[in-house]
Image: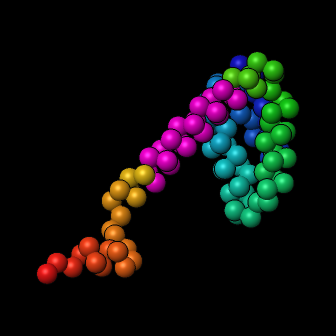
């Protein structure tokens, strides 16, 4: 199995699980910077990991990442739709609808 190393020195075994990489990045990089991490710093760390991967591993992680992002996107869209359906009416029209003589 391939392994990659974070700038902190921590090794990550690449087993096809994107979440394990995300967790390692969070624990080893984000938390060690006490949540004060810039976009550039995090991107540099991610690029460093990707550059250590073989072409086949990169493809595998890209596919899993796209899948996870698609599922997240679908869930956010469904959540927004459900919030819209269950939202209380607002504004002038809502007051007129709510009053019954």
Left or right: where 3 falls relative to 52: left
Count the labels in the image.
Answer: 0
How is the rendered protein coloured?
A: rainbow
Please identify the quadrant where the C terminus is shown.
bottom left
Question: Which span is picked out in magenta?
Answer: 61-80
Left or right: where 98 falls relative to 63: left
Up/down of 82 relative to 2, above or below: below
Q: What residue do we see at 65% from left, 42% from top?
A: 22
Up/down of 42 relative to 18, above or below: below
Left or right: where 82 falls relative to 32: left
Q: Quadrant of residue 17?
A: top right
> Of residues 73 and 87, which is closer to you in this image?
87
Give the image location of residue 81, x and y in percent. Answer: 42, 52
Give the image location of residue 50, x and y in percent. Answer: 80, 33
Q: Quadrant of residue 51?
A: top right
Q: What residue do we see at 38% from left, 53% from top?
A: 82
Q: What residue do we see at 80% from left, 36% from top?
A: 49
Would you say residue 9 is visible in this rendering? no
Q: What residue do we see at 66% from left, 50% from top?
A: 27
> Of residues 56 and 70, which is closer to you in this image?
70
Residue 10 among magenta residues: no
Give the image location of residue 62, x and y in percent. Answer: 70, 29
Q: Quadrant of residue 48?
A: top right
Would you say residue 56 is visible in this rendering? yes
Give the image location of residue 25, x and y in percent. Answer: 70, 46
Left or right: where 64 falls relative to 91: right
Residue 62 among magenta residues: yes
Up/down of 99 relative to 44, above or below: below
User: What secondary structure predominates along the stretch shown in magenta?
Assistant: helix
Please identify the quadrant where the N terminus is shown.
top right
């Amino acid at each position: 199995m391939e392994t990659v190393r974070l700038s902190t020195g921590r090794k990550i075994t690449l087993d096809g699980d994107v979440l394990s990489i995300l967790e390692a990045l969070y624990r080893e990089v984000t938390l060690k910077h006490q949540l004060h991490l810039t976009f550039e710093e995090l991107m540099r760390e991610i690029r460093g990991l990707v550059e250590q991967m073989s072409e086949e591993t990169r493809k595998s992680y890209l596919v899993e990442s796209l899948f996870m992002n698609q599922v997240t996107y679908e869930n956010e869209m469904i959540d927004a739709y459900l919030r819209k359906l269950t939202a209380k009416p607002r504004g002038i029209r809502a007051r007129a609808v709510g009053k019954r003589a």
